Amino acid sequence: MRALPTVTDRDEFDVLVVRTDYHDDQAWQVVTAALMKPWGDRQYEPHVHFIDAPAWAGATVDEVLNAIRGDENLAVVFLADWTTMQAESHPLLAVTTLTREDCPDDEDYEQLTEFGREFRTVPAGVHEVHANLDIGNLGFEEYTGWAHDDPERIYRSF
């Protein structure tokens, strides 16, 4: 596993989006524009910390998680990977930062990751997922369940 640069200067309330695919700059521009749109019923201002550096090209989920492990205020990280850039809806990969060590026992970890440790969400869902996980309003397992129920396995937002 390669070592990636440490993520610095992320405000604890910012969504973290890591670009891992560099084959389509135009698609990346579409994704970033969508992520910077006001969101939610009250049209909240988006706060996003983008990692857009070629050193992250092709990074795996485990490599990204290893690089951000020191950020204790982060419940989820979003990857803009090949699928994000190629699919029409540009679904980002949402990955929980939860590890087995964060849980009291195996049963708790299994319950919290029942549908896996990742799911896809359209850009409109990114802020909602981040905010609800940040305040503990909803759990990652709820979002993975909703994505699991979608025919394309994508969480599409409320």
Image (spheres, rainbow, N blue to C red):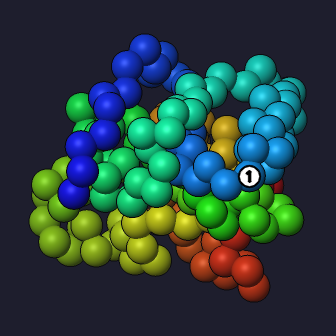
Query: Residue 57: image x %, image y %?
Result: 48, 49
Seen at 14% across and 55% down, the residue is: 101
Instruction: Farthest residue to the bottom: give it.
Output: 151
Residue sitting at x 66%, y 45%: 126
Q: Quadrant of the C terminus?
A: bottom right
Say above or below: 122 vs 3: below
Asked whether the viewer can see residue 155, the reply is no
Q: Which residue occupies 24% across, 67% down?
A: 108
Callout 1 crowding tier (Cα within 10 Å): few <14, some 14–19, many ≥20: few
Q: Quadrant of residue 59?
A: bottom left
Q: Quadrant of residue 137?
A: top right
Helix, strand or loop under label 1: loop
Count of all numbered marks drawn on residues in the image: 1
Query: Which residue has dot 1 on it?
Result: 24
Residue closer to the observer: 144 or 118: 118
Where residue 91 appears, as percent x and y from the top left, is: 71, 60
Res 131 visible:
yes
Examine the rendered structure and indicate whether residue 96 appears above or below residue 111.
above
Q: Residue 86 vs residue 133: left or right?
A: right
38 displayed left or right of 68: right
* Residue positioned 37% across, 70% down in the render: 113
For the N terminus, which image quadrant?
bottom left
Q: Amino acid at mark 1?
A: Asp
- Up/down of 40 relative to 85, above or below: above
